[in-house]
Amino acid sequence: MTIFSQTRRGLGIAIALAAVIRAGVFIFTLLQPIPNESGMPISPLNVSPGIDFAFYDMTRDLLFNGSMSDIVESIGRAFDPDLDPSAPGIVYPAAPVFPLILGVFSYGPGNTLPLAIFYFVLGFGLSAGWLWWLHRKGVPSVWLVAFALLPNPIWLTLNVSTDLLFAALVGLFYWAYFRGQSARIWLALGVAVIAALTRPNGVILLIFIVAALFLGTTDLPKRIRLQVIALAAIPIPLLILFFLPELKSFTGEPARYFGATQSEYLAGVFNTLPIFADRALSFLSLVGAKLLYFSGLRPSYGDTDPFLVLIRAAPGLIFLPGLIYMLIWGGREHRLLLVIYLAPVMIGASQDRYNFPIQPLLFYFGYLAYARVGGILGGPFRGRQLKAP
């Protein structure tokens, strides 16, 4: 058997495992819901219990049942400086794609399966597509199997939210943009706009297009670069302005990182040190803590079984080295993409579900990191020295 046929066989096994494990979890949770970190049951037969979902559900009701004057009034309330944008009843169609999908599928109590099945198909298709990409990059079969079994994508396929939709759009954007072809750069621009209307941080894709093309990181003709830059730049300030209430809510979240909030880190958590050293070390600790939370190396947000916490956190042992490797050796465009992608995390809250759209990149560069270390030290992680995509 040739090496080529062996690797193709490994790809087939990984894709089959991705399908079987997702189908198994889907069927199991039909019979026995799985509690999330807040203890709320997750199942294809249950409406998503997420806090974010409640906002999008109200937005769905506004879009499908409200009048144009209701929408305008709702937007006005969201921008009222005297109101908390995250307060109950404050809703506006800042990101309408997911609410529109909820409406199209009539998602709600007693009618959850159609959208749940759509998410199952979309989640498996996304996994299979990235597995094919990893295979084309020469990633060994055992790593493909590990990617197929990552728990976070399976969970977010089951839990109906914006996460899977946004991850699919980011994957399509990556495929279109990094091909570097004129026709696909326009597709990348269109996908970026849709992503920005799916989640507020989708604006980063438009910012990336402008920055990357302005810096001349592609071989596209100058005329096309200028056209795309102009069309990508126009909606950015409008979208940022429109998302200001969301940004205020996002940056105001009192999230804790290993027991301390962002404001406490910035004020200094090493009180025994001189003020300058305290502030500098505390800031670096905040950045490190956010990267650890982003990679999934964090404690549970609730009362979760320690074994399940370890299973959820284990992929971070690949993602964190991959993030570092990508920042150093990822190439200009990949470094730029990662820096821009991490900007909202550094400004506001950080958690591991935010890495879902770029998990395949973190996984691939994590493999490269272990392959490099293995090439130097030998051992089970030794692999071929592969070039960055």
Image (cartoon, grey):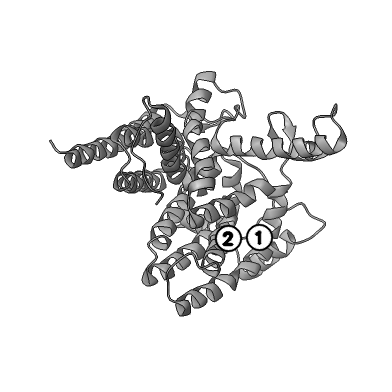
Viewer-nearest of discs 2 and 1: 2
Looking at the image, residue 348 lies above or below residue 59: above
Q: Residue at x 43, y 70 (%)?
A: 186
Does 41 sit left or right of 249 as displayed?
left
Q: Which residue is mark 2?
A: 203
Label 2 to label 1: alpha-carbon separation: 10 Å
Residue 213, position in %: x, y?
Answer: 51, 68
Mark 2 surroundings within 10 Å by alpha-carbon count, few (fewer than 14), some (14 through 19), many (20 or more): many
Residue 365, position in %: x, y?
Answer: 44, 42
Residue 316, position in %: x, y?
Answer: 51, 33
Q: Amino acid at mark 1?
A: Phe
Looking at the image, residue 374 lies above or below residue 71: above
Q: Earlier in the sequence, mark 2 or mark 1?
A: 2
Callout 2–callout 1 Cβ contact below 8 Å = yes
Question: Which quadrant holds residue 62?
Answer: bottom right
- Among all residues in the image, which is located at the extreme left? 1
Q: Which residue is mark 1?
A: 243
Residue 188, position in %: x, y?
Answer: 44, 64
